[in-house]
Amino acid sequence: MGLSEDIVIASGKGAFVKLENGKQLIDLTSGATVTNLGHGNRKIARVVYDQLKQLENVYVFNTRQKIDYKQRLLQELNTGLDTGFYDDIIFLSSGSEAIDCAVKCVRANNPRSKIVSTYTSFHGRTVTGIQLSRLPFTNLIPTNSSPHLFFSYPGRIDEEKNSIAEFNDLVIQHKEDICALILEPYQGDGGLIFPSAAFFRGIAKICRENGIPLILDEIQSGFGRTGTMFYFQSLGILPDIICLGKAMANGIPCSCVAGSSGITKRLSLEHYSNSFGGNPIAMVAAREVLDIFHKEEILKSVEKKSRQFQQGLNVLKDKYPDKLRAIRGRGLIFGIELNESHNHSVGAIFVQKAIESGLLIMPPKGSLKNVIKISPPLIIRKSTIASSLEIIDSILGSL
């Protein structure tokens, strides 16, 4: 039986979850970076309950909730820009749907069909998402069936120039076939990899010079996870399309594709109509998420908590040089890369020990399954961070 089936979570509050057997765990997953504002948030629960009493779903028809949230989200996306570059949003239900919709946007009425992606990317588990990756789970569909092109996502800063050159070579060889590039601003399943802003600016420059639309997959990084509302705002790039989801409504299924109407309007309603996309319940929850971010100054607190976590993890790296290969992260998302040379199951062992010791942690990431992902709710208290670091210290000592 897999690890996820071995435990049954009964409830959650803030940065904690409680199992059916009564045991409480510190949640260092945020439900796969979904519950950024914590479990059981009463403000979000209240607006959802009030909306449930009025209207649940009207399919593709407009509602005041959808209109208002669309305007609000566009304001957030255009923050700091000289112009309102982003002027249209298509609402959907899941991140995978957003990726699929973005692909439709760039391929619609376009003789070019190939999308450039990176080998270790993760863009969902639909057929489209699988075809945009070369991670192990993609073996479900034969590699040679993918119509797309791939280059290497840089694992270290000294690999970035080679990666940019590799992408440029693809463009030179296949320019007449490429309709878009899709990138993650950091790679989660690929091993918690965080390239520099210079890397993204270099890639974006090639796209701009060759008329290649850039799709940025901010499904995991959006809504404060890295310390800014959206990660692209700190990278110095302007993606043509941004895919958002996960933490958008703090647990209520909600996603979107945002871009300029010149791209999104290539699709008519019949191409993206969605049973639940933009429903009033998701819209009021998503609106409340933005309100909480601003009223409670969530991003300021993320910066302080990030320093605490980073410093604590660096202390552990110095303490266990034979067990920790690297610490990587931004905001409140970190990757602890374990040295797997003596035990190729070290990642799985760490996660099992974590649960036994009081931490809820995602299954290990990276191609070697030796990277531990740390992504607590952004509202986690400093005392809880300290407790988490103590437990991680104990686990490393026992490995």
Image: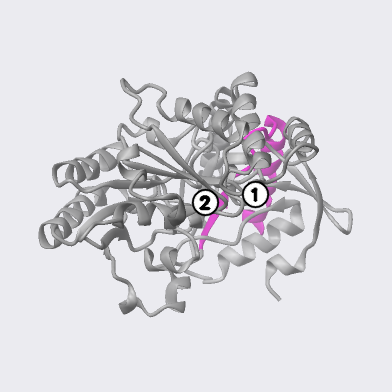
Q: Is 395 contained in the magenta span? A: yes
Q: Looking at the image, which is closer to me, 107 or 246? A: 107
Q: Is residue 248 left or right of residue 127?
A: right
- SS for dot 1: helix
Residue 249 image offset from top left, x and y in percent: 62, 40
Q: Amino acid at mark 1?
A: Ile
How many angstroms separate mark 2 from mark 1 (CA)?
10 Å
Q: Residue at x 50, y 49 (%)?
A: 335
Q: How would you rate the neighbour count of disc 2 (Cα within 10 Å): few for under 14, some for 14-19, many for 20 or more?
A: many
Q: How far across and down, in percent of the image, does residue 282 sit?
A: 64, 41
**Labels in figure, total:** 2
Span shown in magenta: 370-399
Q: Secondary structure at mark 2?
A: strand
**Pointers 2 and 1 in contact (CB under 8 A)?**
yes
Q: Is residue 241 above or below residue 270?
A: above
Q: Residue at x 56, y 47 (%)?
A: 60
Q: Residue furthest left?
A: 172
Residue 391 in view, yes or no? yes
Determine which residue is flagged by label 1: 392
| Image quadrant where one finds the N terminus | bottom right
Q: Amino acid at mark 2?
A: Ile
- Give the mark nearest the N terminus, 2 or 1: 2
Left or right: where 106 falls relative to 356: left
Q: Residue at x 45, y 50 (%)?
A: 269
Rendering quarter of residue 202: top left
Quadrant location of the C terminus in the rendered image: bottom right
> 163 or 313, which is in the foreground?
163
Task: Establish if 375 lies above or below 146.
Answer: above
Q: Residue 7, how many percent across, how many down?
A: 77, 63
Residue linked to disc 2: 336
Q: Nearer the viewer, residue 201 or 87?
A: 87
Q: What is the number of the mark on residue 123?
A: none
